[in-house]
Image (cartoon, rainbow, N blue to C red):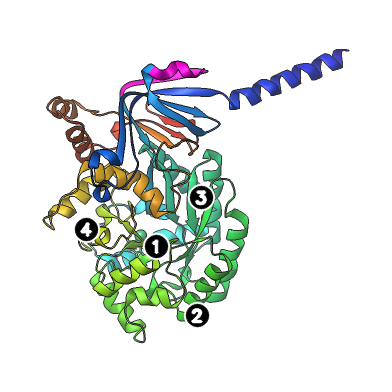
Amino acid sequence: MLFRTKCAALLVASLFAGQSYAETYGVRGSILHFLSDPAQTAEVENSYEYIEDGLLVVRNGKVVDVKPYRQRQSQRYSRIEDYSGKLIMPGFIDTHVHYPQTQMIASYGEQLLEWLETYTFPTEKKFEDKEHALKVSKLFLNELVKNGTTSALVFGTVHLQSVDALFEETEKLNMRLIAGKVMMDRNAPSYLLDTADSSYEESKMLIDKWHNKGRLQYAITPRFAPTSTPEQLTAAGRLKSEYPDVYVHTHLSENTNEIAWVNELFPEREGYFDVYQHYGLAGDKSVFAHSIHLTDSEWDEFERTDSVISFCPTSNMFLGSGLFKLAEAEAHHVRVGLGTDVGAGTSFSQLRSLGEAYGIMQLQSKKMSAFKGLYLATLGSAEALSLEDKIGNFSRRKEADFVVLDWAATDFQKLRYQDTNTLEEKLFALMLLGDDRNVVATYVAGEKVYGQE
Ligand code: GUN
Ligand code: ZN
């Protein structure tokens, strides 16, 4: 009898646990999310939805609804989290970042190729030690959520265990994340080299272990053309043909010396992008970081192959790499995501990326509105990663990844905020002045993973 009672109690407890998972809760605040690219939408107002006093309804880690708070009666809620006066947006997405470079942000004085030799390779060597990789993974993920970033496309190092470590830590947070082991079999210190065969085998093992496990996905990650032999690029292409659903993630046309080097190494190819195309690495799930110095025919090929660019403003300025031509991407309908490219990038904050992106546009006598910028950091990056059916805005049944932002987090920001009138002005000030201080809370799949208080 006692036994049966105990069993019943356990059953009731587990039923309650099930119920609490299925509970519906609301999040109140000013809600902004994008429906389309503001630069490609006839009336900008049709590209977003803004509800001043809104309610985001969440159940089982998914979005159920967004609506004005006054219409809340149509549903029952286990609780309403009140962020009145704050801004609720879909979580930011970082489409290009190197987690092993967290420790070397702000390394002085060099441009790309010398910077890699001087700082990057020695830092990446440390990831042969799994304990180090686990420690940095934790720190890295913590920085992401602290900055309101809920998804990322991430470089590991050449060491398989660097990717295991990152995925193991990410799984605990249930974040949507794509990562891959660097493939690199030449033109780097011997301590960081793999081979065409070992990179193929290890990437395959990682794909089998992690791709589509929960919210995790894999990217085949040749570092860039100069550090892979034709044999290794062939192996990468073979992986892509065997696993068409897996991403490709690499660098392209970042620096003029790099481009000249690629032309020397691959004289038989028509140009840098053609190297990747030749080995079967271009396509709609292929993300090419930077792509700053593309030729006209390369732009055409990007459009034709539906390949994707990650625009990394703070990195491009820090390494003096050049000015990304966002307008050209728009004209060619090439998908562009926003990346921090830490550790060449100087901040984990996508607000800081957008502040710098604005400057990059100004240097080309062009503008970037706050709407375009915040679209890039959310839905635009989701589209760039072919994840727009899962994340990027608050459409029903999407995964409830979101960030709560303070419009003005410091006295000085408050002073500026008082002098803004329209929504666009307020968003622009936030985009130019904001950073992690403005992130009040971050939610991943409906669970709060970071809060300032
Ligand atoms: N090109 C090849 N490797 C790298 C890297 O680690 N960072 C950047 N920014 N560019 C690269
Ligand atoms: Zn990079």
C-alpha separation, residue under disc 1 versus residue under disc 2: 25 Å
Residue at horizontal 59%, vertical 54%?
210
Per the image, the residue denoted by label 1 is 122
C-alpha separation, residue under disc 1 versus residue under disc 3: 19 Å
Q: Amino acid at mark 2?
A: Glu
Check disc 4 and report its element: helix, strand or loop. helix
Q: Nearer the viewer, mark 4 or mark 3?
A: 4
Q: Which residues are magenta?
A: 71-85
Say few, some or many: other residues with alpha carbon within 10 Å of mark 4 (under 14 / 14 to 19 / 20 or more).
Answer: some
Q: Nearer the viewer, mark 3 or mark 2?
A: 2
- Of callouts 1 and 4, the N-terminal one: 1
Q: Amino acid at mark 3?
A: Leu
Left or right of 431, for residue 384: right
Q: Are marks 1 and 4 in contact (CB under 8 Å)?
A: no
Residue projecting furthest to the bottom: 268
Give the number of the disc on residue 327: 4
Give the number of the disc on residue 231: 2
C-alpha separation, residue under disc 3 versus residue under disc 2: 28 Å
- Where does the C terminus fall, quadrant-wise? top left
Left or right of 357, for residue 306: right
